Image: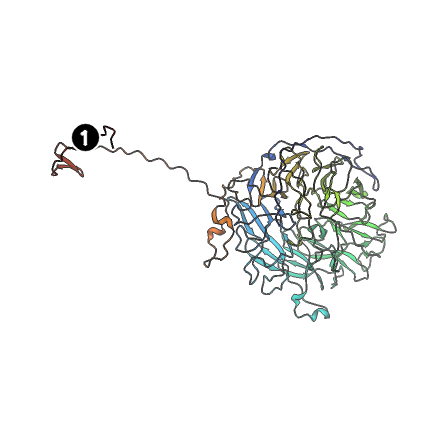
């Protein structure tokens, strides 16, 4: 279902006023269990008109899409994107039709790479066996490697003759090869009765950023897939194997109608480099937390994480926690109806795997209370630390090394835990509010960014409308930024004073609809904030600058024919200033996608033609790019003209697709240099022949024709006809 066009409100006059709301000053550090709330930062000021930082619009998706659309809103869903860190590539959703360098048929994701000749688009999924289309159904899950060269996906279709349907697959986009994360053979008597070992369903618990390593949970245990080789990972410190070991974080379950997970719900149980994976074993009667480690030389070992430091070792190994580990809450987790199996989460780990956070009802350290609480285990030093003031609260996001994390405090509201060395850490309360969407952190944890619909004094986040979550009246969701150094909280998406908020702001739509029926679980997260915390991109229906003139009254989200609020535009917050990335004049909504690590590339989708040749009126993916030294601007694209804009032909060609149809270099080649004009040739007049002679070829010959009588003079005068 496409977003409808609504009557445009003309002559909108914005009263852009700013008001400074001060809060209580805070000291730099806080006691472990006490502290004042963060100060309220002033609203962002208006940046210069036009696209900031000298950005230029580059059309990422091909102008000629055969009547289809790139990254459009479809069936109550906004597009999802995932950008390569350097901004030289982006993966994005399409509306089910192949565009770019795809073979033919349907497609769900396209990967675009920027090269010397511009942006080149290719399909992110191969063709299933016996299928004309590139996909036979919606992918059950999808994830990308950091460099966008590989994609992990699952589907009910069959892609390899030796693999069953629903097999998790890795597709190498560059060379077109497919790898199957081969499930292990059955080991129990019950599983031996299965007609084939391929009937064992494997659930992915996580993977390395280069997709060389995956960890899988099956009915027969916990496994590692590394460079095509499958091995048992549920190995205990004494080298025994637990055939019932399970993933420590909550892996997604490919169950029809079940909860569809996001990458953030995997809780980093597999480190980004794949060298550490956390799992739970209940061989002793209670669930204990372990980490499977692979060192630089490839040697593997298992370490007990949930250890009791107050008890003596057992056979030279640390004693396990008497009460084991407790299940941790997952933000926004809701079990779907139908009684599907729930995979609990027992850990939140830092992305690099150096720290694991878990809860236990046991006193595991001397400074912990008798009832236990939240603990941190450092996998580099094997040191266990009690974290006072944290409790078994959900951890929302953290720095790469886990030394700082944002959590939902048991006392109510958001807080940051910050490690302070050997003395443990401190809890820094932010505000008595909670998040309604996702949360992000800079790699060093100096800045936290999150989506919240909670009411908060001091910000223009009022207004109410029908929200998608819960279908009830609530305040609008806005984007907030907490700065650790300044201990300040700011709203980067709240409208200026005098403008009533009308709808939700989003950093990413990949996380806005976890129960997507089109995409399945998306095991990737847009970046959310630049590495240094200075840039945040988002979209909102509210006009934040005078140039945004396409704001329209909100429609009934469920009684009308539109789902997203009208007049959405893409913005960038940069160092306290607000800039418009999309034009603010499109008659259709524009949606944020993702940004590069430093924020120099902002990927978004819009139906407005922003590049020469983009005249088809359909949705396209654009890169608002800060030019780099040595950048060669892409060639001018070829406009969509004639029959090619009417969609693909109904009858396929018997000779196959011509090479020119699949080529997706962006636009026409540069025109050749003008040629040197030819020298003017002087034609020499021939001499007249004398009377009685006529010229034939180059000679004068005697005229042999009889002499004619003179014609009578016309009676119509000199001007006669």
Residue sitting at x 67%, y 50%: 272
Q: Quadrant of residue 136?
A: bottom right
Q: Quadrant of residue 537?
A: top right
Q: Quadrant of the C terminus?
A: top left
Locate residue 720 relative to residue 645 in the image: left or right. Answer: left
Q: How many marks on residues?
A: 1
Locate residue 678 relative to residue 702 in the image: left or right. Answer: right
Residue sitting at x 60%, y 62%: 158
Image height check: is 237 above or below 565? below
Q: How far from the left and from the top, in percent, is residue 489?
A: 75, 37
Q: How far from the left and from the top, in percent, is residue 464?
A: 74, 41
Q: How far from the left and from the top, in percent, is residue 246?
A: 74, 59
Image height check: is 426 above or below 361? above
Between 123 and 550, the residue placed more toward the observer is: 550
Q: How far from the left and from the top, in percent, is residue 74?
A: 62, 50
Locate residue 601 relative to residue 255 in the image: left or right. Answer: left
* Residue 404 visible in the current orientation: no
- Residue positioned most to the right: 370
- Residue positioned most to the front: 715
Q: Quadrant of residue 466?
A: top right
Between 665 and 358, the residue placed more toward the observer is: 665
Between 211 and 515, the residue placed more toward the observer is: 515
* Residue 685 visible in the current orientation: yes
Q: Secondary structure at mark 1?
A: loop
The residue singled out by tag 1 in the image is 713
Between 252 and 406, the residue placed more toward the observer is: 252
């Amino acid at each position: 279902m496409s977003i409808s066009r609504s009557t445009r409100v003309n002559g909108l006059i914005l009263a852009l006023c700013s008001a400074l709301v001060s809060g209580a000053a805070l000291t730099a550090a806080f006691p472990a269990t006490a502290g004042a709330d963060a100060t309220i930062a002033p609203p962002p000021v208006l940046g210069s008109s036009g696209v900031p930082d000298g950005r230029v619009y580059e059309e990422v998706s091909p102008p000629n899409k055969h009547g289809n659309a790139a990254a459009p809103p479809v069936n109550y869903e906004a597009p999802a994107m995932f950008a390569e860190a350097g901004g030289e590539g982006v993966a994005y959703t399409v509306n089910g039709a192949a565009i770019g360098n795809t073979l033919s048929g349907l497609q769900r994701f396209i990967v675009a790479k920027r090269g010397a000749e511009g942006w080149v688009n290719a399909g992110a999924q191969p063709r299933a066996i016996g299928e004309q289309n590139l996909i036979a159904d919606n992918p059950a899950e999808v994830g990308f490697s950091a460099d966008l060269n590989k994609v992990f996906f699952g589907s009910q279709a069959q892609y390899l003759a030796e693999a069953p349907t629903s097999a998790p697959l890795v597709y190498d986009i560059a060379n077109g090869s497919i790898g199957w994360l081969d499930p292990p053979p059955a080991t129990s008597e019950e599983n031996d009765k299965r007609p084939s070992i391929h009937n064992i369903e494997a659930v992915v618990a996580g993977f390395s950023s280069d997709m060389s390593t995956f960890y899988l949970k099956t009915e027969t245990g916990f496994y590692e897939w590394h460079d095509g080789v499958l091995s048992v990972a549920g190995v205990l410190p004494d080298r025994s194997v637990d055939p019932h070991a399970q993933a420590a974080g909550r892996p997604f379950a490919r169950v029809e109608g079940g909860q569809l997970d996001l990458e953030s719900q995997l809780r980093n149980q597999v480190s980004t480099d794949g060298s550490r994976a956390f799992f739970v074993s209940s061989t002793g009667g209670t669930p204990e937390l372990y980490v499977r480690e692979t060192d630089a030389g490839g040697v593997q070992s298992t370490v007990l994480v949930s250890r009791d430091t107050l008890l003596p070792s057992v056979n030279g190994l640390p004693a396990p926690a008497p009460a084991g580990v407790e299940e941790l809450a997952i933000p926004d987790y809701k079990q779907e109806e139908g009684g599907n199996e729930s995979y609990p989460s027992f850990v939140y780990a830092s992305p690099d795997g150096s720290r694991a956070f878990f809860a236990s009802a046991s006193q595991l350290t001397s400074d912990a209370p008798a009832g236990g609480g939240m603990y941190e285990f450092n996998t580099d030093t094997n040191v266990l630390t009690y974290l006072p003031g944290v409790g078994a609260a959900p951890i929302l996001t953290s720095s790469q090394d886990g030394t700082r994390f944002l959590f939902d405090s048991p006392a109510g509201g958001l807080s940051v835990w910050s490690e302070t060395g050997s003395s443990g850490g401190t809890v820094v309360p932010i505000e008595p509010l909670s998040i309604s969407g996702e949360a992000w952190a800079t790699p060093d944890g100096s800045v936290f960014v999150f989506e919240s619909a909670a009411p908060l004094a001091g910000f223009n986040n009022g207004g109410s409308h029908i929200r998608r979550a819960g279908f009830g009246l609530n305040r609008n969701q806005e984007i907030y930024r907490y700065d650790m150094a300044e201990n300040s909280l700011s709203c980067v998406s709240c409208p200026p004073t005098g403008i009533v908020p009308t709808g939700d702001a989003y950093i990413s739509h990949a996380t806005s609809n976890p129960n997507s029926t089109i995409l399945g679980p998306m095991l990737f997260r847009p970046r959310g904030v630049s590495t240094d915390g200075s840039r945040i991109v988002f979209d909102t229906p509210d006009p934040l600058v005078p140039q945004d003139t396409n704001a329209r009254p909100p429609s009934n989200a469920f009684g009308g024919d539109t789902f997203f609020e009208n007049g959405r535009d893409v913005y960038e917050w940069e160092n306290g200033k607000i800039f418009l990335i999309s034009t603010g004049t499109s008659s259709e909504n524009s949606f944020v996608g993702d940004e590069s690590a430093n924020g120099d590339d902002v990927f978004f989708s819009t139906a407005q033609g922003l590049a020469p040749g983009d005249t088809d009126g359909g949705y396209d993916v654009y890169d608002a790019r800060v030019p780099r030294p040595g950048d060669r601007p892409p060639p001018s694209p070829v406009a969509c003209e004639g029959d090619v804009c009417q969609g693909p032909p109904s009858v396929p060609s018997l000779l196959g697709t011509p090479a020119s149809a699949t080529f997706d270099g962006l636009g026409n080649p540069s025109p050749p240099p003008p040629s040197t004009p030819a020298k003017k040739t002087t034609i020499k007049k021939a001499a007249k022949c004398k009377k009685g002679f006529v010229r034939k070829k180059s000679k004068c010959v005697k005229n042999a024709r009889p002499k004619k009588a003179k014609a009578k003079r016309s009676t119509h005068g000199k001007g006669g006809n």
